[in-house]
Amino acid sequence: MLDAPFDFVSNLAPMAKARAIVKRRKAVRNIKKITKTMQKIATAKFQKSLKRAVGTKAYSRKVRELVAELAGSIGEISHPLLRRPAATDGGTVALLVITSNRGLAGAYNGSVLRMASHFIREQESQRKKIDLFVAGKKGVSYFNFQKRPIAQRIDIGDTPKFEDVEKIAQMFIDKFTAAQYDAVYVGYMNFISASNQKPEILPLLPLAGVDQGKAQKPAEGRINAIYDFIPDAQTLLDELLPQTVKTAIFQAFLDATTSEHVARMISMKSATDNADKMVKTLTMQYNRARQSQITTELSEIMGGVEAMSA
């Protein structure tokens, strides 16, 4: 929008050229006001979303660690959420892709969708069927354009709530335990820091690493704690395993939302900076056009004086 060439008035007369540059400069200044406002809005939303994403990340990580330690204390674990399909080609896999509802976020949606498309091709090369769940209008538009069927469109809104995400997680849990899906994955933009966001595919089900808790060795200098469980460990595991799935998918939505605001904030700042540069360039062009116009007028005056005195 702001990267158009600047020679659009090169063939106009000096006066018309100056007027055209003034109009173009005014339009660019108006665009700059819009992009700067959008940058401020994205910054405010990012600060609010950052607190939620960072605040819940430690809890999500600790729940998974606790479940792993609990699973290690039990020994042999048998739970529907830990069911692993046979290592053969075929089967059905669910993929939830989280995108944004709005554009003007730089490469945010493109990165997530390219990664999701690559993952889908990999799964299809293993003769697996993909049930596609998409959150965000941009993802829906993309897959519709690709003529790829969408099993369900997810509408969470700009501010994810645990109550809404819990329903989605419970749907995946029910279908996985009923053996409708061999695995469930989430494609999203993982928020690592304000300067680092990475598109990732999160294996949601079966729960990776939980049933390996017994095999994990404690870190150097760390002592494994021995717990007494009330109620018993198996009962706690039955409660905590679904909670682990729900917190993981909720964290994915929070990270995706925070990454979206960062991408839009950076994109709008870049657009504002480009508008500044364009205004300066147009001002220089206007000054040259005005100078050329004045020179032409002076030449005409001097020519008229010489004609009258001849």
Image (cartoon, rainbow, N blue to C red):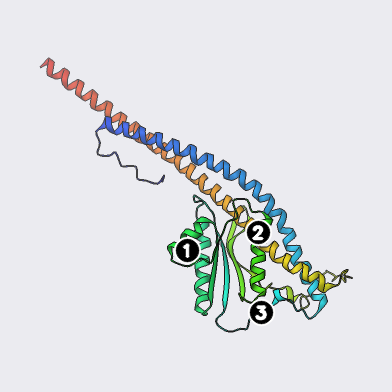
Residue tagged 3: 84
Location of residue 269 with respect to 80 vertically, above or below = above
Location of residue 271 with respect to 73 vertically, above or below = above
Q: Residue type at mark 1?
A: Phe
Residue tagged 2: 165
- Mark 2 or mark 3: name the one nearer the start of the chain: 3
The residue lying toward the viewer, choosing from 85 and 264, is 85
Count of residue discs: 3
Horizontally, residue 73 falls left or right of residue 291, namely right
In the rendered image, residue 100, in percent from the top left (x then y), is placed at 54, 54
In the rendered image, residue 165, in percent from the top left (x then y), is placed at 65, 59
Horizontally, residue 103 falls left or right of residue 73, namely left
Residue at position x 66%, y 50% in the image: 50
Location of residue 24 with respect to 56 vertically, above or below = above
Note whether residue 303 is visible: yes
Location of residue 200 with respect to 81 vertically, above or below = above
Q: Residue type at mark 2?
A: Val
Report how far apart the C-alphas of labels 2 and 3 lie in the structure. Answer: 24 Å
Q: Residue type at mark 3?
A: Arg
Report how far apart the C-alphas of labels 2 and 1 lie in the structure. Answer: 22 Å
Rate crowding at label 1 as few (under 14), some (14 to 19) or many (20 or more) other CA atoms within 10 Å: some
Report how far apart the C-alphas of labels 3 and 1 lie in the structure. Answer: 29 Å
Residue tagged 1: 143
Residue at position x 53%, y 53% in the image: 101
- Mark 3 or mark 1: name the one nearer the start of the chain: 3
Quadrant in which the C terminus appears? top left
Query: Are dots 2 and 1 in contact, CB under 8 Å?
Result: no
The residue lying toward the viewer, choosing from 37 and 102, is 102
Residue at position x 49%, y 49% in the image: 104
The residue lying toward the viewer, choosing from 67 and 268, is 67
